[in-house]
Image (tube, rainbow, N blue to C red):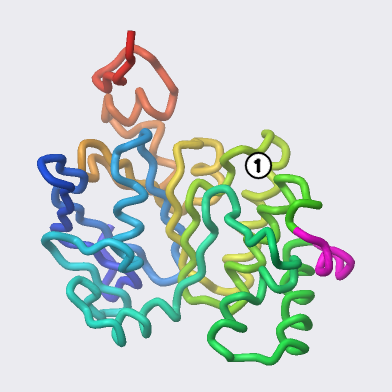
């Protein structure tokens, strides 16, 4: 699917680490307000692609634009401008153990001195409410929270600055199926409420089906299939079929050490 003015656009993006080619010419558009999920096995380059968009890694070749602004080779000022549009839910929540929940949620805003501490706490409580958590949680430390609660706090942090684009990195990793479903529902609700564009990476097909308008599969450095979520069961692609149904037999051979 090609958008006239996509929110995020990748063209011919390549990235290698020495002789190992990880991204081998990625083409992908993410439309304004769209939720796109990238699926693929471990080590297929999903996180590398995300890091290239975020500017944490530099693509070797190709173009990555956000609202038409080129980020490949961009200077620090341009990258910072682009990154101000982003929110991020990290794999494993990635909360700061030494800070109470409210400071975790408002960490970015405090670091950028966009609010004082009283405003930051007020805002954190409001964002926690959006993810279904009471004000009493604000003073707790991350260690006092369950995995599902930590993920909710991380989601509150991801939306703290009302971002235009939210990245979700394996949002349901480490959660039981019920809590994973709760987080998926929250992701759908939150992205709709803040009107954000969402780009997620996961190997959890239940999650992908729930949160995506469109799914793209990454395999051996290329997008091998992309289409509306409801079309994935009729992709006609044997690699996609093997992945989404979790079959050991098929064209994808996993490296298994004897």
Residue at 27 percent of width and 24 percent of height: 238
Quarter of the image with the N terminus is: bottom left
Instruction: Assess whether residue 116 is covered by the magenta stretch.
Output: no
Residue 19 x %, y %: 10, 41
Most foreground residue, 172 or 141? 141
Secondary structure of the residue carrying tag 1 is helix
Q: Which residue is mark 1?
A: 180
Q: Quadrant of residue 156?
A: bottom right
Count of numbered marks:
1
Q: In the shown orientation, is residue 142 left or right of residue 85?
A: right
Q: In the shown orientation, is residue 191 left or right of residue 131?
A: left
Instruction: Assess whether residue 136 is covered by the magenta stretch.
Output: yes
Q: Quadrant of residue 83?
A: bottom left
Most foreground residue, 208 or 103? 103
The answer to whether 106 is drawn above or below residue 212 in the figure is below
Residue 22 x %, y %: 21, 44
Residue 230 x %, y %: 45, 42
Q: In the shown orientation, is residue 58 left or right of residue 51?
A: left
Residue at 79 percent of width and 75 percent of height: 125
Residue at 43 percent of width and 22 percent of height: 246
Residue 180 x %, y %: 65, 42
Q: Residue furthest front?
A: 98
Query: Mark 1 Cα within 10 Å, few/some/many (few <14, many 20+)?
Result: many
Q: Bounds of the magenta span?
A: 133-141
Most foreground residue, 66 or 140? 140
Q: In the shown orientation, is residue 251 left or right of residue 243?
A: left
Residue at 27 percent of width and 61 percent of height: 57
Quarter of the image with the C terminus is: top left
The answer to whether 127 is drawn above or below residue 207 in the figure is below
Q: Quadrant of residue 245?
A: top left
Q: Residue furthest top?
A: 258
């Amino acid at each position: 699917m090609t958008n006239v003015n996509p929110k995020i656009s990748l063209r011919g993006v390549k990235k290698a680490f020495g002789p190992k080619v990880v991204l081998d010419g990625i083409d992908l558009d993410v439309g304004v307000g769209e939720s796109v999920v990238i699926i693929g096995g471990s080590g297929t380059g999903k996180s590398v692609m995300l890091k290239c968009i975020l500017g944490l890694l530099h693509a070797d070749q190709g173009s990555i634009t956000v609202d038409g602004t080129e980020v490949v080779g961009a200077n620090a000022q341009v990258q910072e401008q682009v990154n101000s549009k982003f929110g991020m839910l990290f794999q494993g929540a990635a909360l700061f153990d030494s800070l109470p929940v409210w400071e975790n949620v408002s960490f970015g805003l405090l670091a950028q001195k966009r609010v004082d501490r009283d405003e930051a706490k007020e805002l954190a409580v409001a964002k926690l409410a959006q993810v279904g958590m009471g004000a009493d949680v604000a003073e707790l430390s991350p260690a006092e929270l369950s995995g599902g609660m930590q993920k909710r706090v991380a989601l509150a942090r991801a939306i703290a600055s009302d971002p235009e684009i939210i990245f979700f990195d394996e949002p349901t990793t480490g959660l039981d199926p019920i809590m994973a479903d709760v987080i998926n529902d929250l992701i759908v609700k939150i992205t709709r409420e803040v009107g954000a564009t969402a780009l997620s990476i996961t190997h959890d097909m239940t999650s992908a089906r729930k949160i995506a308008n469109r799914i793209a599969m990454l395999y051996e450095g290329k997008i091998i299939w992309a289409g509306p979520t409801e079309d994935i069961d009729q992709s006609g692609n044997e690699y996609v079929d093997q992945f989404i149904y979790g079959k050991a037999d098929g064209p994808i051979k996993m490296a298994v050490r004897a």
